[in-house]
Amino acid sequence: MRRAKIERKDRAKKNLTGASSRVAMELDRQSKTPYYRQIYERLSDAIVHGVLRPGERLPSARSLASHLATSRGTIDLAYDLLSGEGYVQSLGAAGTVVAPDFSGGLKPPVSLTRRPPAEPAPGTFTVKPFMMGLPALDAFPRKLWARLSARHARALTSPAMVVPDPAGYGPLRNAIASYLAVSRGILCSTEQVIITSGFQSALGLITRVLFKPGDQFWLEDPCYFIVRRALQAIEADVVGVPVDAEGIEVAVGIAKAPRAHFAYVTPSHQAPLGVSLSLARRTALLSWAASADAWIIEDDYDSEFRYGSRPLPALKSLDQAGRVLYVGSFSKVLFPGLRLGYVVVPESQLDRLKRMCQLLYCDRPVLNQAIVADFMTEGHFARHIKRMRKLYADRRAAVAAALVDVFGRKIELQLQAGGMHLLARLPGCKSDVDWVARAASHGLAPVALSEWRVEEDCGQGLLLSFTNIPPQNANEAALRLKQAISGTGKRVQGA
């Protein structure tokens, strides 16, 4: 065992020849600065001062992680930060290089660098074709929403103006519990429902209470990149577990990390591949969690939208041992700007999570919660989902037909039973990241599949949302995508 470890370290050192051999790549284990930040600072300083030259290759994340005796996720996070700041460029399977257009001059510190705003200024945001994560904004019942909003604004009472219940607005929690019992097969009490400011808030709440430094996390591979980066930011030991036609391969996860403390899964509609977790895998996953004393975070992000069949019961509905934390959000069914979600908490952990809400997570305006509560209890929510399911089925079919018509045999669409996006694989594509950049310059907003990988290569492909593309615009959107990729289309100014 010791000899094998020494041999692996020797191989890692050989892989670090060249660019990184001129940089003092050692970690200060006593420093309070996170490891990923130390790596970022060493490499960015070397690039700024010309030690590493434009176009020069950086060591692979695997070899650098082995050399520094840290997790690969830490290296990936440092490289992501370098890429975001323009120091390096990812070439996919070909590795990472210093940005070829980097001038070599001194850049101001990152904290002082003038950056464009993360979000467009109010009034300037436009929905672009294929943009992920957005419901059909053109079909949202704005007049009804305005009426409910005005009703609650007029009826604002003194109790509603003081510090709210840290677990959330009672009538909304009750409405969610009733809805989950009917639609997702989850039998939970109102007390078990905690309102959050969306999915990321729920993830932060769960990890702040249950996560301990060094805990291993199973992640579906590929997986939603925001989750991967968030876990890497708290120095979690991320373990990629491959996904096949039946969902996450539980047996592989057990072989790689049997004592992992968490598993993050999207069982109803795997993000991004779209497959559903089979009953056998669900049973195996729950059995592993119970025996390993592990927690499962079930992200049920767009389960309402299935075409041709009823939504599958949630994994939580099968949870007899109380190991699943079920996370839902109103971002996909209503609109992201609402910033409301929820988590169904096992009774054993309810007091701990409520205490943390009282300390750090009292950030959910009661007014919005009251509006959503009425939207649900008065039947508008169920009717809205039904309308959107029909609308999305029509838009999905139109966009899929248009892509096949425009691209012909040069595209392979993977149509799953539900969801709000299509996965398009294009034979011959060497860099989906490059194709996404070309599409962006033409006013389109697909997402590169390769950006969602954790450890294993998931191939090249484009994630294409159809929710905001009316059928009459499908052919135009598909043609613009083909022209952007081929370099024949007209670039959009300011895109």
Image (spheres, rainbow, N blue to C red):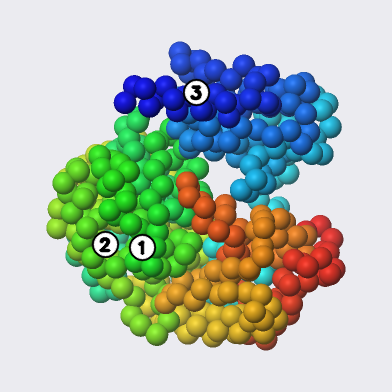
- In the picture provided, is 454 more to the left or to the right than 57? left
Q: Earlier in the sequence, mark 3 or mark 2?
A: 3
Question: Residue 136: image x %, image y %?
Answer: 56, 73
Seen at 50% across and 43% down, the residue is 229
Seen at 84% across and 69% down, the residue is 488
Tag 1: amino acid: Gly
- The Cα atoms of the two marked residues, 3 and 1, are separated by 37 Å
Q: Quadrant of residue 302?
A: bottom left
Tag 3: amino acid: Asp
Residue at the disc numbered 2: 281
- In the picture provided, is 307 more to the left or to the right than 292? right
- In the picture provided, is 195 more to the left or to the right than 454? left
Tag 2: amino acid: Arg
Residue at the disc numbered 3: 10
Seen at 49% across and 76% down, the residue is 415
Q: Residues within 10 Å of mark 1 (few under 14, many from 20)?
A: many
Q: Residues within 10 Å of mark 2 (few under 14, many from 20)?
A: some
Q: Nearer the viewer, residue 236 or 133?
A: 236
Q: Residues within 10 Å of mark 3 (few under 14, many from 20)?
A: some
